[in-house]
Amino acid sequence: MKESASAVKSSPAKNGAIKSIAVYCGSSLGSSEIYKENAIIFAKELAKRDITLVYGGASVGIMGTVADTVLQAGGNVIGVIPALLEQREISHKCLSELHIVETMHQRKNKMIELADGFVALPGGFGTLEEFSEVFTWSMIGLNNKPCGILNINNFYDPLISMIDKMADEQFLQEKYRSMAIIEKNPTVLLDRFDHYVVPSLKTYD
């Protein structure tokens, strides 16, 4: 289906129940088999919990691995891909739903709209940009849903250090230092999603 999407304020799932998670991750598999292996473990956990996967719609890389695994386990997968990347990223043809949008902004907004939470797996600049946006939206009150990082193979250690540096140098308010749920174990990560407490809004006093 082809559609447009506009930015909307997103709210957490009712009664704290996480029914869908947007996953941001690479369209490549990375340099080590460990990334694929752990992506499969994470995807199986989503299917086990009957959590719908919302992702970028590609059939390649970590993106394709996560989607294929959820589908093989009988889970529900929704892809969102802009028309300009449909061929480049090789859109997945066997999804439960595939939304084809016009722009990258519409892709991100649609994924935010469809998801009850957000998880970053290893990826490149696109992954980092998408996760940074939902994290920022949480700080300013446009998004009240949990943001998590699955730190496979210590991939996100430099980002975690950067978050601490921002807080130490007072460019990030202290209450946001630990706002992202960071775990190496997907079971623990998803358990913590169900107990997420929305932080207070960013202030300037």
Image (tube, rainbow, N blue to C red):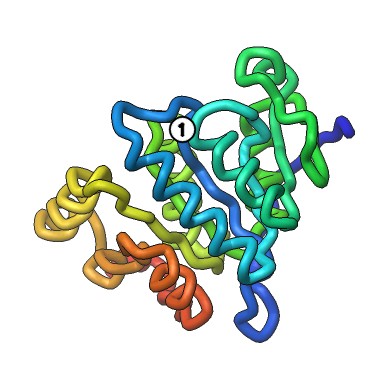
Can residue 113 be seen here? The reply is: yes
Q: Residue at x 62, y 71 (%)?
A: 49
Q: Residue at x 49, y 66 (%)?
A: 146
Q: Quadrant of residue 74?
A: bottom right
Along the horizontal axis of the image, is 172 left or right of 75? left
Q: Amino acid at mark 1?
A: Gly
Please tell me whether residue 174 is drawn above or below residue 123 in the rendered image.
below
For the residue labelled by badge 1, is the local secondary structure a helix, a strand or a loop? loop
Q: Badge 1: few (under 14), some or many (20 or more) residues near its Cα, within 10 Å?
A: many
Residue found at the far right of this picture: 1
Along the horizontal axis of the image, is 63 left or right of 91? left
Please tell me whether residue 13 is drawn above or below residue 115 in the rendered image.
below
Can residue 10 be seen here? The reply is: no
Residue underneath mark 1: 26
Residue 145, image x, y percentages = 55, 66
Name the image quarter holding the N terminus: top right
Residue 82, image x, y percentages = 70, 26
